[in-house]
Image (tube, grey):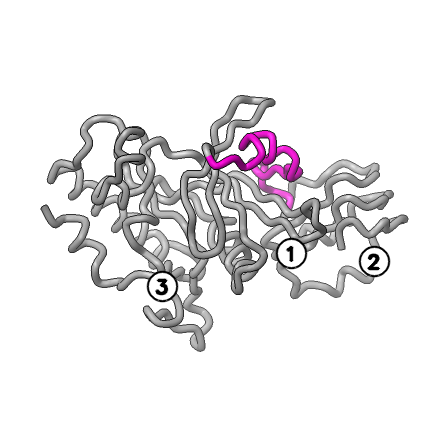
Amino acid sequence: MRRNMFEGAIPLSFDSLRGIDILDLSNNSLSGEILKFLEDFDLQLLNLSYNHFESEVSIEGVFNNTSATFIEGNGLLDATNGFSSTNLIGVGSFGSVYKGIFDHDRQTVAIKVLNHLRYGASKSFKAECKALRNIRHWNLVKMLTTCLSIDYEGHDFKALVYEFLENGNLEEWLHPTPRIHEALKEPESLSLLQRLNIAIDVASALDCLHHHCQVPIVHCDLKPSNVHLDYEIIGHVGDFGWTRFLFDATQECSTNSCSTYPMFNKLHILCRQ
C-alpha cells in the first residue's frame, strides 16, 4: 500500500488484519496517531516512514526493535556506487550481493538486492525476514535492515542489508579463484584447526536454529558459499531464503525442492585436505 497517496488516519478496521506478515504504508500522506493496536501485530516488517504522523512511536510490541531502520533505495544506490560491478561480491539464487558504504556513518554493509524476475524471490525475501527478525547469535549473519521501494522502471525493489564480513565466504577459501585470491588476507589456505573451528561455528549456529528458537528453523541450503567469515575467520551462517519452519508439517526440506547443494556434503568438503 506504499506510494498510493493515501490521506487521513490509519483506519481502525486495520485491527482485523492480524494475519498479515508485512504492512508497508510508506510514502503516503497519512496523518494522526500511530494506532496502539499495531503493537500486537506479529509482523515480519512494518514500514510507516515518509508520512505525517504526529504521535510518538511506541516502544512496545512490534515497535520494540531499536536496531531496525528503514532506508530508501537511493541510499543503497549511493552506498554501492550505483550498484556498480566493482561493488558486486556475489550472485545467488534470487539476487545479487553488493558491498556498500553508507555516507552518514561510513558503515560498511553487504546489500542483497532481490531479482524481481526470479520466481520465488519475493518468498525468499519474506523467509529471510521471518527467520532473522528475532534471532541473535554469534554465528549467524546479522541482518541490519530492509528496503522496500519502487525502482525507476516501476518494479518492486526489495533489498536486505547485512553486516559486512571481511573474509568472504567459505567457498572462496576452499576453492579460490584469482579474483577472490587477491582480496583475501593471509593465510590463503585454511589450516586444519581453522577448518575444525569453522565446523564448530556452523554446528553452533544450527544448534541455535534447531533447538533454541521458539519455532525450530531448518536452513535447507547449507553449503560453503552460505558460510561467511569475519576478520578472525569465525564462521557465520547466512542466506536464509530457503528456510523452513517445523511448525508446518507440510513443508519438507529436500535437495530437489529446497537446497541448491546436497546437504550431506558440507562437513566433508569443509574438513577435506
Residue at mark 2 = 12
What residue is shown at x 64% (from left), y 39% (from top)?
Answer: 73
Residue at mark 3 = 259
Circle 1: residue type: Ile
Range shown magenta = 63-85
Residue in front for this viewpoint, 63 or 149: 149
Q: Main secondary structure of the magenta part?
A: loop
Q: Which quarter of the rendered picture does the N terminus lie within?
A: bottom right
Tell me: 83 left or right of 204: right
What residue is shown at x 43% (from left), y 61% (from top)?
Answer: 242
Of labels 2 and 3, the one closer to you: 3
Residue 54, how many percent across, how many down?
A: 83, 37
What residue is shown at x 81% (from left), y 46% (from top)?
Answer: 28
**Reading the chain from its start, which is encountered first: label 3 or label 1?**
1
Of labels 2 and 1, the one closer to you: 1
Helix, strand or loop for disc 3? loop
Helix, strand or loop for disc 2? helix
Circle 3: residue type: Ser
**Reading the chain from its start, which is encountered first: label 2 or label 3?**
2
Relative height, residue 41 to residue 167 (above, below)? below
> Which quadrant of the view contains residue 172?
top left
Residue in front for this viewpoint, 233 or 171: 171
Residue 207, how many percent across, how many down?
A: 30, 54
> Which quadrant of the view contains residue 103?
top right
What residue is shown at x 43% (from left), y 75% (from top)?
Answer: 249
Circle 2: residue type: Leu
Residue 7, how many percent across, how many down?
A: 89, 48
Residue in front for this viewpoint, 165 or 79: 79
Kindly check if marks 2 and 1 are in contact, taking CB atoms under 8 A apart as contact: no
Residue at mark 1 = 22
Helix, strand or loop for disc 1? strand
State how far apart marks 2 and 3 are (Cα): 42 Å
